[in-house]
Image (cartoon, helix red, strand yellow):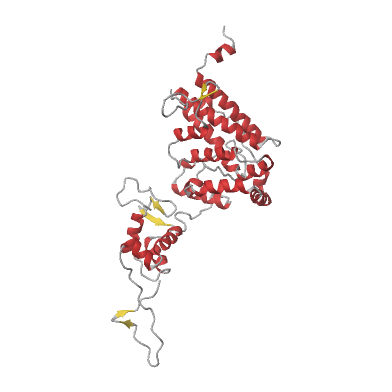
Amino acid sequence: MLDMKDVQMAYARWRHILTESQRHALKAVDEWNCSSGNYCDFLTHMHKAWHYLLHAEFHQAKIDYHYKDAQTGEYKLIDGEPKAWDLEFCLKQRYPNSSDPVRLNAELFVALRNKVEHRYEHNAKVATGGKAQALVMNYEHEMVGHFGGAFSLAERLRFPVSLQSLTAEGREQLRATAAKLPKGTRDLVAKFEAAIDPAVLDDLKYDYRVRLVPVIGSKTDADLAIDFVKLDDLSEDERKVMMEAGRQGTVIIKNRHVEVADKDKLLPSRVACLVESQLPFEFNVQREHIEMWRRLAVRPTAGASDPCDTDARYCVYNEAFKSYAYTPAWVKRIVKEIGTVDKYRAFFGREPRMKKVTSLPRQEGPTSSSLHDGQPMRETA
């Protein structure tokens, strides 16, 4: 009979690599959950966990993941062995889309691993907690998605709970702690996120921010300590409620009706009115607004195969009414783009229609007619 050592030796090489990856992932989470754990060690072990995971995937797929000399085609060697791709390069091969939230999340931690100073590790842990949670969850999803549920670590990973997240005083301490990070680390995160689309910053695969909500009422057999909701399984309106609640710390109460569909969104006519109120010339839905959203790729044209393919910063598609609504940020963008006569000329290649005089100088005698040049006087929007 074969002993366990012989059975392990019989595994394919990718299986050994994956086992090493899992070992580092578990060590990382242990460091996070232990009150005396080391955040720098968490970063190091998760770096290795992701690195080995992608190497295991490449090895199983028979992808050569070693650097070669561009001219000779020969392997680059370290201590006589071919040099394997580093994690950053592996991420680019696995996730070619540079805006992928999973890739961006892992790349941030590659940068942080080389930056965090030991004496500031607690501050860094507090400031990047949601992103670290996403890093671990993305790892689990990637592993299960590629190798199957038999390799899941779900039963051995534990959900971390920080007391600071449970009280208002604790949340203020979180902000204060994050502000104490060294300038270099704060600048690294700020510059990294400045180049990311706001929609990606809100993606749970990039930053998994959660708020614990006590369950009140009679306990039932269906109760769980924590109920995770997958955003992909929610409707568009339900996703908006959840994301807005997450931003503002709102607790969603069962059976309470909250009108949130397209909250703070604007119809085209309202957009035109708000824009025109800030300009010295006219702004019309048909003449200017349509041309602007087309040229700035804010939303697809009518009849497009995917009407939801909008720039979410400025426009959303309402499935129920088959129409588009715009955000206050879109009004600001329009004013920024064409807010002066010169900018208008540069954008549209034509002269703007200046607003008509809306009031006449006060004169003695009877009040003048409401007609001016044969037309009703127009109020400024």
The percent position of residue 100, horizontal first and vertical second, equals 46, 40
One can see residue 227 in this view? no
Count of picture labels? 0
Residue farthest to the front?
71
The percent position of residue 140, horizontal first and vertical second, equals 53, 32
Which residue occupies 38% across, 47% down? 309
Residue situated in front as seen by the camera: 110 or 164: 110
Q: Find residue 27 and report its image quarter.
A: top right
Q: Is residue 350 above or below residue 237?
A: below
Residue farthest to the bottom?
365
Instruction: Specify the quadrant that holds the C terminus.
Output: bottom left
Residue farthest to the top?
1
The percent position of residue 137, horizontal first and vertical second, equals 54, 36
Residue situated in front as seen by the camera: 344 or 143: 344
233 left or right of 32?
left
Which residue occupies 45% across, 49% down? 237
Q: Find residue 38 and report its image quarter.
A: top right
One can see residue 232 in this view? yes
Which residue occupies 39% across, 60% down? 267
Instruction: Specify the quadrant that holds the N terminus.
Output: top right
Residue situated in front as seen by the camera: 127 or 167: 127
342 left or right of 204?
left
The percent position of residue 28, horizontal first and vertical second, equals 62, 32
102 left or right of 339?
right
117 left or right of 147?
right
Which residue occupies 51% across, 19% down? 13
Q: Is residue 198 above or below residue 336?
A: above
Residue farthest to the left?
374
